[in-house]
Image (cartoon, helix red, strand yellow):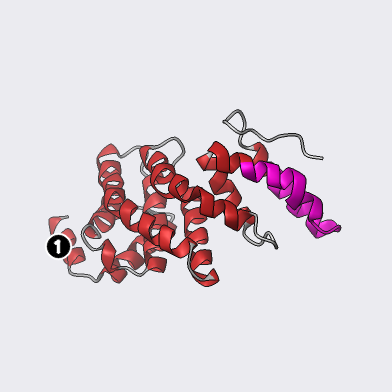
Amino acid sequence: LAEKATALKELSAQDICSAAVGLARSPFLLPETAAAVAVAAEGRLAELSPASLWDFARAVAEILGALPQHPEQRGKVQAVFMEAWPLLAESAKIGLTSSPQEAGLSLSGLARLAAVLPPDSPVAAAFVAQLVRPNATVLLQHACDGELDRLELAGPLLRLAGGEDWMALLQNLALESLPRLPAGEDASARMISILEWVAASGGQEGAPPAFP
């Protein structure tokens, strides 16, 4: 294993990222191999492009979720996020306030990562604390844009953040956004989808109000 780890360190950061993505998609994930690939990226994450950094983080989260019975490897993989969080936070902060393309990349990266992080885990809590809540106001702006193009990406993230921005989104949905959705089967299906993730807030602060 030590020889394999040395060989991995000789790969480029992008090659390590590609290996992690491939492992995360494999139905036959080997815990030691997966942990070794994730750990090989330590100290190298700053070399990745923003898109690759989001891909790597999602892959590592998927690998982490596949290791519930392997505490040693799980601990090693969790440690990789300690380096990743500040880089992801900076990428999100810049991307969300940049061009529509960069904003879309950051929103997609945040949403895809949120979807695979193990629930109620330390990394999930760190994700909300370091990436979601600091950007909640900007996420609200994206969720309430004129065309509602990014509502399904930004809205569930605001649900995780909770607080005033989540409440503001609920009020906007109830009074402005949902009533102006066009009539038709597609719009009805979209409204049902929106209401489902709104209702998933359950008993958290800012639970959904009654919609007209």
Report whether 163 appears left or right of 95.
right
Residue 69 placement: quadrant: top left
Q: Is residue 197 visible?
A: no
Q: Which residue is mark 1?
A: 6
* Residue 45 x %, y %: 28, 62
Q: Which one is in front, 38 or 105?
A: 105
* Residue 77 x %, y %: 29, 48
- Say if 1 sits above or below 172 in the image: below
- Residue 169, magenta (yes or no): yes
Instruction: Check disc 1 and give the amino acid type.
Output: Thr
What residue lies at 66% left-to-right and 62% top-to-bottom? 149
> Dot 1, how many residues are within 10 Å of its Cα: few (below 14), some (14-19), or many (20+)?
few
Q: Which one is in front, 169 or 59?
A: 169
What residue lies at 32% left-to-right and 58% top-to-bottom? 87
Q: Is residue 205 visible?
A: yes
- Span colored in magenta: 168-195
- Residue 58, magenta (yes or no): no
Q: Which one is in front, 110 or 17?
A: 110
Residue 16 placement: quadrant: bottom left
Instruction: Indicate the quadrant containing the N terminus: top left, top right, bottom left or bottom right.
Output: bottom left
